[in-house]
Amino acid sequence: MSKFNEKKVMPRYSLICMLLTLVALAVLIKAGYIMTAQRSYWEQVAKRETRDSVPVPSQRGNILSDDGQLLASSLPEFKLYMDFKQLHEAKNDSLWEAKLDSICMGLHDIFPEKSAHDFKAHLEKGRREGKRYYPIWPKRVNYNTYSEVKQLPVFCLKRFQSGFIPQELQSRTRPYGNMAARTIGSMFNEKDMGRTPRCGLEFSYDSLLRGTDGLKNRRKVLSKYMDIIQREPVEGADIMTTINVNMQDLAERAVLKKLQEIDAEFGVAIVMEVKTGDIKAIVNLERCVDGKYREIQNHAVTDLVEPGSVFKVASVMTALEDGVCDTTFKIPTGNGVWHVYGRDMKDSHWRSGGYGTISLGKAMELSSNIGVSYMVDHFYHNNPERFVKGIWRTGINDPNISIPIEGHARPSIRMPERYPNGQWKNWSKTALLWMSIGYETQIPPIYTLTFYNAIANNGRMMQPRFVKATVKNGDTLTAYPPQVVKGREQIASEKTIKIMQDLLHRVVINGTGKKANSPNFWVCGKTGTAMIAKNGSYKGAPNHLLSFAGWFGEKDKPYYSCIVCIQKQGLPAYGWMSGQVFKDIAEGIMAKYVRYDISDARDSTSHPIPDVKNGNIFSAQRVLSLLGINTTTNYATPATQAALVWGEAQRNAGSVLLKKEGMASRKHIPNVMGMGARDAVYLIESRGVRCIVRGRGKVVEQSLEPGHYIKKGEICTLKLE
């Protein structure tokens, strides 16, 4: 008989099957509900738990000076947040409440701008709202500050226990502050996590500095995130600039001093190495609303300005190269006022009667407007195109000059044009005259300097070089050697270049550039004073651009060229003001080339024999003999001879006294006046008397008189001066 009881088992089996069927249906219904109604919600949850193709920022390269010093570098900065939901999930609410006062006091010590009471109110508000990324402090902090905050109660726990979230960001810092700020460049620190360049070399060389970002995937496993690296980031390369920190600092201080002295609007200075075209210093200081001078705009490369009289060099060079005249060409400047084509042209000394008839060379020395304009009008009036072509030939506006600063301006020197009927299209009778002295042209200062540098370099025009190499891990990736501007191996004949070099030296010896000259080295250059139009008009308070461009070094070996431009409102305003800045920069730079003979440092009025203080004659004679000094000769100083005589007398007197009184003299205080501390203390303490010394030098006073009978336990105080 079977033991299986169908009546009892089957109902139970059916019940279990029905229950399992209901559970399965519930699972299917729930799954369907999740897949449809709750789909968007769980997709958001999934995104929080896993992230694919997360970029891993690369380390931005550094910007270095010509000798490897840091001009710009990336450092980590942090924004501090609190995740109160995570704190609650870790069941640390009670710990937070217990330590809140300590946390707030600690935050106040780190950030004194905000009181502990305010910190407490701020954090309690975030906790009530259950914020996940609640800012503890609104600004970025450096690593040291972050480390201090990390040591506070609760914050020092692990990430998923404390709720403390530091967000690491990259910050671009310049160790030398505002030095060459617009040339080095800056970053948008609040955008793209501080990885977007704004200007300067940071912008121009961004592709090299930025490097290549990596990729990673993030997965949450057992309440912890795991990073799976797909591609490692490649850090950016460093760029080595041509800027010299010492020269840059020297130039900035020289410009700032003059700007403050004459209350100017802004000042520019550029220092270029003659042979290579390397930009060693570039200054752009501008007065801000608070009255202080800072680098706001790169005027040296972006400003289109009428150069004024520094342009006369190009005008005279064109005439000499065309062979229309030489420096002996006579010019009737008259009383300093030339009425020509319905307008008056004036020289700077017109009020004192002018210069009369002078040569072209003298006109350059005196920076005579009439002198240069008369010469140009005399030879080019009927053919102004030839003159402008000659100016273009000098390379001062060559489009092949490359400036690696975004936004740099191109010179504007217009060519005369005619209508088909022969009438001038964009030209007037006076255009040539004013162009010849630096008006009706617009040239950035760096182009003017490049032109002057070519004259110093015997006619060879070099590209302005800002970056000489890219390096990485100590290896040079790319070198940027000095380059000649295409087609500018020789901007003029050797003869013309030599004449211009001589003329520009005469300007600083005899002419308007005397303030820029130095007796210690060779200087050449030209002043310039241009009135600047304001809103298209020259009326009202005049604005002036004061310039000096030139070079310095040895006569046949110039080292550096330099241009200084200062914009000033009102009078007085003279080009030599910039010449003074040029001189300060030049003398500061040339100081490193000065070598003195050590014999020049010897003082001919001093005695090489040391003075000997009163004291032990035997010790003094021994020391002097070891120094090779014969005390019997006349080379000994009077003080030394007197000391030796005094010592000999003391020795003889002591011998006589000992013979007469034996050792009785050892019971009396000796005379130590005029002795050094060592000898005086020895003589007195050898008699059993304790000494106290006050001061330095020779004994000028002793508390126990010479010859005083010594008593046991006495103390002698010596005063030295």
Image: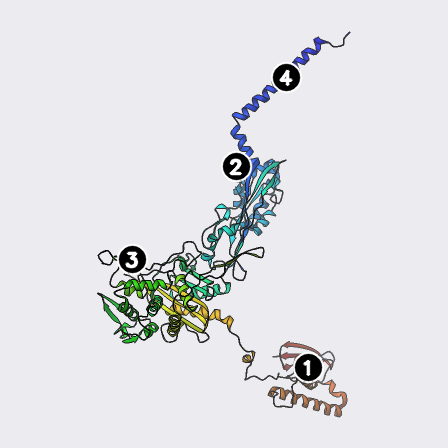
For the residues bearing labels 1 and 2, Cβ distance under 8 angstroms = no
Residue on which the image places disc 2: 129
* Mark 1 or mark 3: whose residue is earlier in sequence: 3
Above or below for 106 versus 504: above
Q: Residue furthest right?
A: 1
* x and y, in percent, of residue 274 in the image: 45, 66
Residue topped by disc 1? 679
- Cβ atoms under marks 3 and 4 closer than 8 Å: no
The label shown at residue 19 is 4
Identified by mark 2, the residue type is Glu
Circle 4: is it few (<14), some (14-19), or many (20+) Cα within 10 Å?
Answer: few
Q: Earlier in the sequence, mark 3 or mark 4?
A: 4
Reading the image, the residue beneath label 3 is 536
* Image x and y of residue 418, in percent: 25, 58
* Alpha-carbon span between mark 1 and mark 2: 84 Å
Q: Amino acid at mark 4?
A: Leu
User: Secondary structure under badge 2?
Assistant: helix
**Mark in front: 3 vs 4:** 3
- Label whose residue precedes the other's in the sequence (3 or 2): 2
From the top left corner, tell me how far across and down residue 280 is, in percent.
47, 63
Which is nearer the eye, 477 or 589? 477
